[in-house]
Image (cartoon, rainbow, N blue to C red):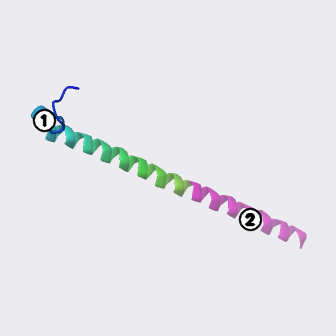
Amino acid sequence: MQFDSFSAFLAMGGYGFYVWLAVAFSLLTLGSLTITTIIKRRQIIHEIKNKHQRIQRMRAAEKMENTL
């Protein structure tokens, strides 16, 4: 291991603030992208289900119309 202690690891040779700031920013960005993707996926699936149900209702209404 390159560092003598855990505090030396956190200090990163005097560049710890910048290193950990970059790590935090990267993790925050990736986390927000992941959460946004999950939310958008759920919305799209919900919209597809709604459209499918609407099509089924329209077909059922057409069938009822044709039988009258």
Horizontal relation, residue 1 to residue 56: left or right: left
Number of marks: 2
Instruction: Give above or below for 55 relative to 9.
Output: below
Q: Quadrant of the C terminus?
A: bottom right
Q: Residue at x 78, y 63 (%)?
A: 59
Instruction: Give above or below for 56 relative to 19.
Output: below
Q: As shown in the figure, which amino acid type bears the numbered disc 1?
A: Tyr
Percent coordinates x, y for residue 45 in the rendering: 58, 55
Q: Quadrant of the N terminus?
A: top left
Secondary structure of the residue carrying tag 2 is: helix
Q: Residue at x 87, y 67 (%)?
A: 66
Secondary structure of the residue carrying tag 1 is: loop
Percent coordinates x, y for residue 3 in the rendering: 17, 29
Disc 2 and disc 1: Cα gap in Å?
64 Å
Judge depth for marks 2 and 1 and give the one in front: 1
Which residue was labeled with disc 2?
A: 58
Q: As shown in the figure, which amino acid type bears the numbered disc 2?
A: Met
Foreground: 30 or 58?
30
Q: Residue at x 63, y 62 (%)?
A: 50
Horizontal relation, residue 54 to residue 19: left or right: right
Which stretch did the figure color magenta?
A: 45-68
Horizontal relation, residue 66 to residue 6: left or right: right
Most common SS among magenta residues: helix
Which residue was labeled with disc 1?
A: 15
